[in-house]
Amino acid sequence: MTTRFADIHARLAIHRSMEVRREEYLDHMTFRANIRPLFTEIFGPLIGLREEWEQQGASPEELAFQAFRYRRPMWTSLPVNCGWDTPADEQVLEETDEYIIARDYYGRTVKLIKASATLPLPLNHPVRNMDDWQRIKHHYEYSESRLSANWVTTAKQAQDAGHVVSVSIPGGFDEPRQLMGEEALCIAFYEQPELIHDMLATIGQTAQYVLDQVSSVVTIDQLDVHEDFAGKSGPLIGPILIQQFIKPYYRRIWDMLRDRGAQLFSIDTDGNINSVIAALLDTGINVMLPMEPAAGVDIVSVRRRYGKQLAFVGGIDKHVLRRTPSEIEAELESKLPHMIASGGCLLGLDHRIPNGTPLANYRFYISKVWEILERESHNH
């Protein structure tokens, strides 16, 4: 099953970049060394932006994001599946000029708005109670098919090429949300705790079986988990629930991989996560992305508070790209010097480049980032 992290790593690989080998990236993100700063584009443009840029005279290389300069690690996400297995056939049920209604691999009916969305929204969910869960639980149980036939070769080639080797596990919040929906899950933590515990125990056991085999053969450098459990007003799950439900699930996987050489445990969650950073650190997390400024997350403030406990990916306000060059420069000058000096950060926009971003502004942004990176690296 393709994961969001595999998609992110694949997108990073197409950029015109100075490629950083595994050893330098791991040393940088664990604060062992700070040779030169890292900079990337994590998610790329929102739907429609390329068309805007084409009208503004963008070259084919710019539209493909191959004309812009980044400095990022080389990645390989191993082809193993720790989540939903034997997916249902995806099928388009209805399509208009505005939207697509389809059946997704969970068997849900979903709706995608063509003009503005990259992810469809579910219209229904398969689990409401323990009986429903028992009917679909087999999709999360272990089978040998979870490891692709070429995973060992892929891992060995990645290591020989100096790539960071990563694997991902389903989110402890996100995967139950896919099955239940956001509101039902938040209620179930209190009214059906045994259901959520059984979900995470089942998913965790399978992930442990899969990654035990993988980590017995190759060193996994980074464990990834996608959660997206916060908005501007804060997280949908608090420190107590993280302690009770998420920590045991994360720890059974992370502790095993860490003992076998893994160095980074990265969580992807938008929104204001300030109130749960300490709880997430206790689960083993030591990297966070995308560190969203519009939601009140400031990488300089977080670094001052947590120091070398936590590395970042992202952290630059995407919305500033639609403003003036002086405002873009102010955003970069307020963050980059401190992060360059302290290390432990793969700098980049905090999410997709928003529509309405002038091509000239993005060109200026890239140029100004490199001006600051080179100036501060020389000073450092």
Image: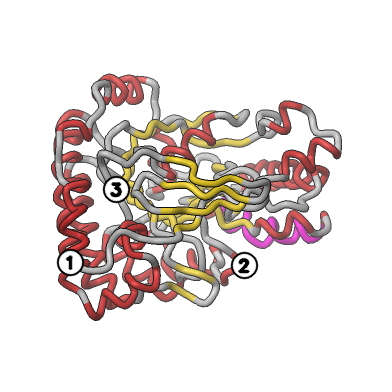
Indicate left or right for 379 with 344 as reference.
Answer: right
Total tally of numbered discs in the picture:
3
Q: Which disc is residue 169 wearing? A: 3
Q: In this picture, is 4 found above or below 283? A: above
| 2 and 3 marks in contact (CB < 8 Å) | no
**142 or 136, nearer to the observer:** 136
Of marks 1 and 2, the one in the foreground: 1
Q: Residue at x 58, y 45 (%)?
A: 95
Q: Which disc is residue 130 wearing? A: 1
Of marks 2 and 3, the one in the foreground: 3
Q: In this picture, is 110 found above or below 142? A: below
The span picked out in magenta is 326-340
In the rendered structure, which amino acid carries the disc numbered 2? Ala
Q: Residue at x 27, y 62 (%)?
A: 127
Q: Position of residue 356 (x, y in %)?
A: 77, 53
Q: Secondary structure at mark 3?
A: strand
Q: Secondary structure at mark 2?
A: helix
* Picture quarter with the N terminus: top left
Q: Which residue is mark 2?
A: 294
Q: Position of residue 103 (x, y in %)?
A: 42, 47
In the rendered structure, which amino acid carries the disc numbered 1? Met
Indicate left or right for 196 with 95 as reference.
Answer: left
- Magenta span dominant secondary structure: helix
